[in-house]
Image (cartoon, rainbow, N blue to C red):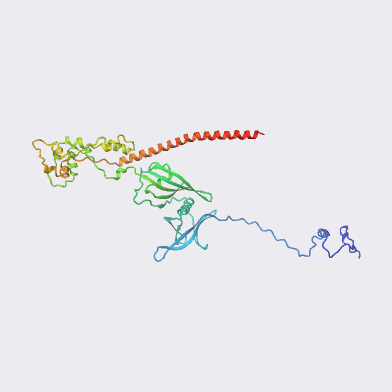
Amino acid sequence: LMISFDDDLSDFRRDEPSEDIFGPPSSSSSKLASLFEDDSVAAPVESKPALKPTTSQPRPSTLFSSVVHIFVPDPATAEYTSFGRGGVALISLPDTKTLLLYTASKAVLTQLPILPSISLSVSHPYVYFTALDGKKWSIAFDNDIQLWRILAWYLLLTESTTVFDLSAGVETASIVEEGDALLVGLTSFTANGEELKLTEESDVKLRLSSRKHKHDWEKHLTGLRKGAIRMAYSSATVTLLTIKKVRRQRESDSEPRTVESSDLPKDTVSEDTVSTITVHDTVSEPATESMPDESIAPETTVPHATVLARMAKLGKPMLGLAELSTVIPPTIDTPPTVSSSHIEPASAIAIDEATVAQGPATVAQSIDPLPQQPSYADFHRVIGLEMDRLQIRLEASFSRMLQESLGPIRDQLSRLEENQERILQKLQTTP
């Protein structure tokens, strides 16, 4: 039986001596593959169905993480005891933000969703919260920056009106009230995607008023003391407020008010003012009570006292400040002059050498009543205002002098640059 092949198989004849069937495969195997689709002895491999494309779920991102000290309440005493060191992280998903508390071995202790209904409380440096299972936790950070960041994230994510007091300030300092002048330090926190941006702003000088607020955070300043630190949320920004300086609106109001003798009726001046003089010796009534009213008024009246006080309260510069030290004329004279200047000749009392030798006791009884010493609180207030104005003028003068001194230096530098360019051009042009 003779089988005839096509011309493509003519190269595989047995009678050709040059062909070795046990040798390495020749290029003819490709021809067999084209005819029989496969020339290998391996079993055919079944084609697997293509996998359906799966939707990739977004991976959680970490907004904040830090090492903390963990505390839990003791069931017996209800006091917080140390649980050990661990970590806290703020995890962000498209739908939720979760506060994760875990141990040093990465074991999760609790998870707290960040929602407006979930509240945090702060007692520096501790942060307290209650988990969904009702268990209470407390954490403390190693530094204040980490504490500020976690609280800022909480306020930004929840847009809560909660105010965190991080420092009470100086206990002996007075409480800030309406009308006080303040110097406030500002630190703002804003969220830029998954990044928290911290900005140190320049200090702000302001006078606190309940009717008009230039900044939204001014309403949170009332009730603070010097050195107090408070964090509050307003308009997608968390602001950290620090009270650096406080100047009272009316420093004289904190002092007990005294009625000047010039404001009293003439018929009561001598009685009230004389009653303030302490008599350390048992002697008869001082001669000042029998003096007529005309002799008292010129010595006790302080010229321009009320005008100076009003100008000081208004914050205007006072004219004639030198009068404060010389406005009160000397009222202590020698005992013979005081005791006999306003007494009738018929009722004059002879002063012998023994009476004069008594010294301060006789003088204290016979001299005219000393007028009220002026309060220097207004004087200090005006001096403070003048110092502020002087500081502003000095800063402006210094800036102007600096610009004037830098002008010639800039001109010299420009001339040097021009000379340098000319020299370089000459060097390039010379062969």
Name the residue located 40 percent from the left edge and 44 percent from the top edge. Answer: 183
Pick the residue in front: 364 or 39.
Answer: 364
- Is the residue 58 above or below the residue 42 in the image? above
Name the residue located 11 percent from the left edge and 42 percent from the top edge. Answer: 353
Q: Is residue 11 left or right of residue 346?
A: right
Pick the residue in front: 93 or 101.
Answer: 101
Q: Is residue 25 left or right of residue 382?
A: right
Considering every residue shown, the one lying at the far left of the view is 346
Q: Is residue 301 left or right of residue 38?
A: left
Name the residue located 63 percent from the left edge and 33 percent from the top edge. Answer: 426
Considering every residue shown, the one lying at the far bottom of the view is 76
Q: Work out which quarter of the rendered image holds the N terminus and state it.
A: bottom right
- Is the residue 172 above or below the residue 76 in the image? above
Give the tally of numbered discs. 0
Pick the residue in front: 401 or 252.
Answer: 401
- Is the residue 97 above or below the residue 374 in the image? below
Name the residue located 32 percent from the left edge and 43 percent from the top edge. Answer: 251
Pick the residue in front: 74 or 268.
Answer: 268
Q: Work out which quarter of the rendered image holds the C terminus and state it.
A: top right
Residue 10 x %, y %: 88, 59
Residue 310 x %, y %: 30, 37
Residue 66 x %, y %: 50, 57
Considering every residue shown, the one lying at the far right of the view is 1
**In the rendered image, which quarter is residue 124 located in?**
bottom left
Residue 158 x %, y %: 47, 52
